[in-house]
Amino acid sequence: MPFQDKDLPEFIDSLKIGIGRTAFSVGAKFLFVNHALAEMLLYKKSDLIKKKLADIFESKKSLNDFLGLIRRQVSIDGYELPLRRKNGKNIWASVSVTVEKDAGGKPKFLDFVVEDITRQKEVEQDLVRSREIFKIVFDNSAAAIMVTDEHEKIVAWNPFTEKMLEMGREELFNKPIKDIYPEREWRKMRKLNIRKKGALSGISTRVIKNDSSFLDVDASISVLKDRKGKVMGSIGILRDISKQKRIQEALLQAKIAAEGANSSKSMFLAKMSHELRTPMNAVIGMLDLTLDTPLTDEQRDNLKVAKEAAGNLLGLLNDILDLSKAEAGKITIENIEISLRDVIKSVCKGLAVLAHNKGLELRYSVADDVPALVIGDPVRIRQVIINLVNNSIKFTHKGHVDVSVKQVARVDGECELQFSVSDTGIGIPPARQSALFEVFSQVDESTSRRYGGTGLGLAICKKLVEMMDGRIWIESEEGRGSQFNFVVRLKVSANAPSVAVAAAGTGVVLPSEPEQSPDGVGRLRILLAEDNLMNQKIAARILEKRGWEVVTVVNGREALEVVGKSHFDLVLMDDQMPEMSGVEAMTIIRNEEKQTGLHIPIVAMTANAMAGDREKYLAQGMDGYISKPIDREALFQTIINLVQQRKNP
């Protein structure tokens, strides 16, 4: 249609869709274009007017095909073809063309309406590619993919479905989806209410194969709905997890077996600890009692050697149990307020006799900037230091052993402390130092034969330090002594004074004389419940030599009868006794005391000495705890403290 109205070009120029006119010929130039068409093809409007129709077509052939189509049809609506832009790149366009003829009926003008559909084409191409990718995934997926209709019948599936279920087209087409599940599993799937949720993944279930066998699968189900929300069907992806299930089952059985073995090991260690400590109590107790009697020098020397050997055997037992507990994770690290100065002084005081007997000077020092109070585990820190000091004393023949503590760093309420034990002993060659903290490791066989020991002490130290998130190492030179160091990070107690008292942190420790002062408790009457007659005899003689009266019974039932008839200042109670255990008897006594308002101190004196045993007995109602073999001084001190507490509540 010719543009006759003078306002029409201005109107067309304002449209957002491309408009143009050319003569009907291959070499015709544009007679009119609007701004939208010019912008679409990246031209200025004045520049595009000068261009030929052929300039915006991809090729001459493309233009000829286009004109030929117009000659045959006169008009075209929505013809899609690529058009060339000024930068040489193509866009996709939807072109509608109307032919205006002259008075003789011949084509004269071509009027164009052009719409940029590049984005639409890209989406279509992406869709085509997506469909191709989906088909590739669908056909080659190593998971079964099934599509059901609104009646829950299988209408489509991928090749792997047939392989996994061992079914062909005849068995799968229009098969109700519930038929591939065992009845119990289908009920479980129904309870998941997948239709309401829309989709659910990670469903562990089972399906039935063609041979009626079961297959473990991981299922993901998505519900398909139309625009109105009506359910059209569902798509399910099933992945074979039979192998994983078998592995999981094997791992579970292995875990159960390992836990059972670990439990058996713990029970074995506890049993062996008890059974070994019971005769050791008799051996060490009898040696102590005999050494208190008149003896010849030869007899005394022989008994001292026997007692030392028994002590070494008990140390070995403790080392093996500690190592086993550490490896099994049975040792727990406490976090309580402690004074490191008191710990160091106490350790050195306890080992002073051992050092003095070898003519060694045992010294200790705590740096001024070490906090007076920290939060840590005094038992484990003490155990590490004792092991290291014992080790130094063993391998040092003259000179001294020094124990020191210094602060390495202090940040945000925490301090990093370095503990060091140095000696003037035989030293260790560099080649042997790296293996020194390994289990059963010593410098060489000659060292083991000469000095004894199992090589467990340093291995235990390493494990304990690492459990406290620290590290341990050695600095040594053969013939010139050794220095063992370990570093741990501890919190500074809120109760710690800002300035430490340095005078309390340095000293040379000498063995103290036995205290001769009276204990202040007078003559005590003690009930001893012990079923092992040898241990009973030893404990009774130890107590009687102290000047205390002892009444003995062999089980918990007899202990109850005697306590009910007579007065006692304290009860020493073994646990594992026939007829009634010590804990059972103690529990009955405590229940009766709730009625009377009285309270008799009861001390657990037992060969149960595994980690946590002390805490267990105290939590059950015991007032104290003594492990076998009996340490006489520890026994006396426990009894005196409890009796004094009773007299002076």
Image: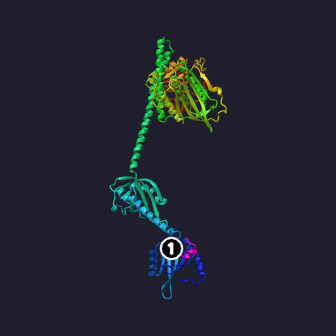
Q: Which span of residues is magenta-colored?
A: 42-51
What secondary structure is found at the residue carrying circle 1? Answer: helix
604 vs 362, nearest the viewer: 362
- When the figure is inspected, residue 333 is found, relative to residue 156, above or below; the finding is above
Q: Which amino acid does label 1 sit on?
A: Ile
Indicate how the structure is coloured in the image.
rainbow
* Location of the C terminus (image quadrant): top right
Position of residue 509 measured from the top left corner of the image (x, y, whole percent)? 59, 22
Q: Is residue 329 above or below residue 401?
A: below
Residue 272: % across, % down: 44, 29
Judge whether residue 281 can be spotted in this image. no
Coordinates of residue 212 in the picture (x, y in percent): 34, 54
Please tell me in which quadrant of the rendered image residue 502 appears. Answer: top right
Toward the viewer: 421 or 49?
Answer: 49
Report the residue marked by disc 1. Answer: 56
**Nearer to us in this view, 359 or 518:** 359
Q: Give the x, y percent position of residue 420.
A: 56, 29
Query: Badge 1, how many Cα within 10 Å: few under 14, some, many 20+?
Result: some
- Compared to residue 80, the image places residue 262 above or below, namely above
For residue 381, which quarter of the picture? top right
